[in-house]
Amino acid sequence: MEADAVLDCLGLYCPMPIVKTAQKIKELERGQVLEVLSDDRGIKSDMPAWCTKTGNECLGVEESEGEFRAYIRRLS
């Protein structure tokens, strides 16, 4: 998936990936996609929940070799 911006949260654990995502998403225009890199397993459930709560769209969370890539479309 192609993202408009990438946020590296590797080495950060709950709640920091969500906190950093909340800050970074404000820099994007509505409709743009943010890719969040994380090695915190909690992102698989935390990111979709955060998107639902904030009115953004979670396009999916992919896992590869212990790293996660979450894709969020800014809608709010």
Image: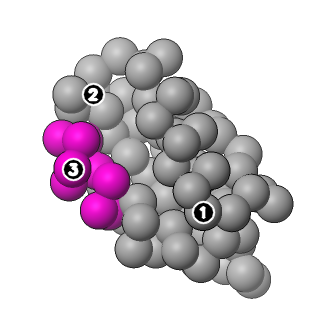
Kindly identify which residue carries mark 1.
14
Residue type at tag 3: Lys
User: Which callout, 2 or 3, points at the residue further toward the start of the chain?
Assistant: 2
Residue under the point 53% across and 74% down? 42
Q: Residue 46's x, y, as percent?
A: 41, 66
In the rendered image, the quadrant that contains the C terminus is top left
Confirm whether residue 3 shows in the render: no
| 52 part of magenta stretch | yes
Q: Is residue 60 above or below residue 23?
A: below
> For the view shown, which residue lies furthest in the bottom direction?
65
Residue 60 in the magenta stretch? The answer is: no
Q: Amino acid at mark 2?
A: Gly
How many neighbours does mark 1 have within 10 angstroms: few (below 14), some (14-19), or many (20 or more)?
few
CB atoms of marks 3 and 1 within 8 Å: no
Q: Judge left or right: residue 15 versus residue 55.
A: right
Q: CA distance from mark 2 to mark 1?
A: 26 Å
Whether 12 is drawn above or below 66: the answer is: above
